[in-house]
Image (cartoon, rainbow, N blue to C red):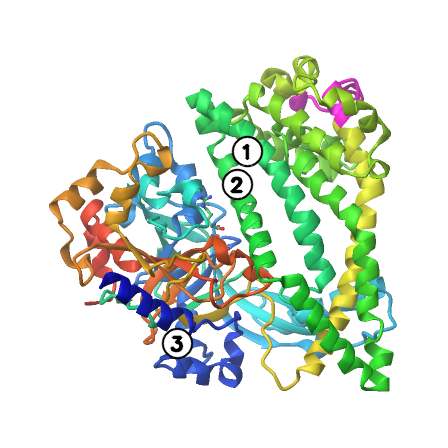
Amino acid sequence: MRKLLASLLLLLTVTSSYAVEGMWIPTLLKRYNIEEMQKMGFKLTAEDIYDINHASMKDAVVLFGSGCTGEVISGEGLLITNHHCGFGQIQKHSSVAHDYLTNGFWAKNKAEELANPGLSVQFLVKMEEVTASILKGVSPEMSNDSTRKVIVANIEAVKKSYQDKNKYQVDVKPLFYGNQYFAYVYEVFRDVRLVGAPPVSIGKFGGDTDNWVWPRHTGDFSLFRIYAGKDNKPASYSPNNVPYHPKKFFPINMKGIREGDFTMVFGFPGSTQEYIPSPAIRLIIEKSNPNKVDARTIKLGILEKQMAKDPKVMIQYASKYAGTSNAWKKWQGETKGLIRLHAIERKQKEEQAFASWVNQDGSRIQKYGTILGDFNKLYSELSDIQIAYDLYNESVARGSDIFGLISRFDLMVQSISDTAKFNKLKPALEAWLPGYLKDYDQATDQLVLPALLKIYVERVDPKHLPGRLNSLKSDLMNPNFLQSAYQKSIFSDSLKIKSLIAGFDAKAARKLKKDGLYELYTTISGHYAKNIEPKYLKLTQDILKVQKLYMAAILEMKADQRLMADANLTLRVAYGKVEGFEPMDGAYYEYFTTLKGIMEKEDPKIADYYVPEGLKRLYLSKDYGPYANSTGEVPVAFCASNHTTGGNSGSPVLNANGELIGVNFDRCWEGTMSDILFDPERCRNIALDIRYALFIIDKFAGAGYLLKEMNLIQ
Ligand code: ARG
Ligand code: GLU
């Protein structure tokens, strides 16, 4: 029976996926999307989502920090976002005595909420198209440089033209590769306090093992509160500030979700590349992703071994490991997905259709006739520069700890005669150093650096390498090769580093040149800055110019079609349905997970699968309060077919009535190619079920008082 039901379900869902590609512009919903959204079940209007005359949903969504989304869920400025978005703040407030990462944190009243200098949230006041003003004075014959100059000047003028410029922050950003421009006016709040966070064993349950993977059981949320001056306007931190009263906050729907329900995600997706041509995709699949992945595989392998050996290293490298593995895992999923979709062949077909459209008309041939040929030529020139660029980034710029430290000293050396710059760099380095030293393990770093340099010299064409590295090739085969350089280096002795900064001057700078590791770093970085970077920048800019023209042509060719603009870290609407998917032949993934699954994954031997006692007790006593689903389980996460990307973390997932049902936090691995090519059958966003957050706040943390300020629909 179950089998029959499952296959019926499969038929129903797989053959009729409801996914809609695109992250849509709120001011254009009326023109392009609202009708379709309503057909799919949405019960509200475009004005309910975005309106500048009345409170609308946009007034409850914020850009959280510099790359996440958050949403307001009470009349007193309470905000929910992901645990991984608030991670930096939670970590900064943590110490051995108050380990909020391990134990969680819950302010018992507003006085206990913790300030976070440097953190801001931004509300979009309004957005407007300003293409004509920005492109005034630009013509196709102009060089890259003069085009850029005119545009930069126009952007400044447009920004100035918005009154209240001191009250608001104005951004102007390109869409469709600069064929359109929009201005965005934001109200920025800088007093944002930490209200609550579950322990990592809930907020990061599954850790890097489950990252990017469905089925998922991560309680990925944290709570903050926005504070304002007495006039309800932004104010810098003050104990006298009061909770912000938002124009709008999201009601929370606890009634639960069903497969097929309408969902929308309203947030700040960072970037996508849906219009790149086939040679670009080939470069990603064949060169860029594999090289970056292989370099990181080497690094992660070393970190893993070292971390397993020593609990101190485990803590020191936890966050570096997570940071390195996040994109590493995504790139692998992306490559697989692109291959599975035959992305290159698909784009080639589109390009053939494009070519025949161009060839239909003499003026088109004149304007657009060289695009595809230019792409091919430029991407083939880019190919080995791209390898050098990618592997420099992975192996040298962000590979080892010690090169990171040395690069900061090198910046000081280079600005030794620029007093103003130098005087900024020095205190910045002093402030950064303690954190660096706290998380530095020489034995580990000493293995990482030669291993990464080895792949660098093996993969990069010798003509793009400094001669000195070429001659080190055989030495790098020896993992202990740099041992004595490390031992003799100033940069592996914390006392020497500190006194070096304290008395840093031209003489100290000259002496640095005798340090073997410094010398090695500057040889490689100097060669890169002189020989690789300029070529890379020139080629990528030339490519962008062709891409802009290609985009213009596509907009012309498909003038009667609805085209999505690539994400650009501005407010967008994605919509789809709650739905599972078929990840591979023979398997079907259900659309939701429950607490039961957390207990199934529990493994005291694996840190990622540690389950806190309090949660186990709740599970055993079935003390679920009003948070269980219709079958008596506590829901944890669900997946849906909304087109999302990085930056959508923390975004509200809303139902047909605009009520909060979840908080977005990831995508499924089989769908990670959606930044380049969206597959409605397999691309799913992953959201925390809002009932799990409420359950954790109330039942696990005993912070149920926070629920009183929310508008809960039961
Ligand atoms: N994959 C998600 C994103 O791209 C979550 C990353 C944080 N979680 C982790 N285990 N590293 O941001
Ligand atoms: N975790 C991502 C973020 O921080 C969202 C996942 C995605 O890339 O879709 O924004």
In this rendering, the answer to whether 188 lies above or below 313 is below
Q: CA distance from mark 3 to mark 1?
A: 48 Å
- In magenta, the rendered stretch is 500-520
Which residue type carries mark 3? Ala
In this rendering, the answer to whether 208 lies above or below 119 is above
Which residue type carries mark 1? Leu
Q: Residue at x 82, y 86 (%)?
A: 361
- Asked if the residue at label 2 sits under 8 Å from ligand 1, the reply is yes
Label 2 sits on residue: 325
Which residue type carries mark 2? Ser
Say which quadrant the N terminus sits in: bottom left
**How far across and down, in percent of the image, does residue 59 sit?**
42, 70
Label 3 sits on residue: 55
Secondary structure found at label 1: helix
Label 1 sits on residue: 300
Earlier residue among tags 2 and 1: 1
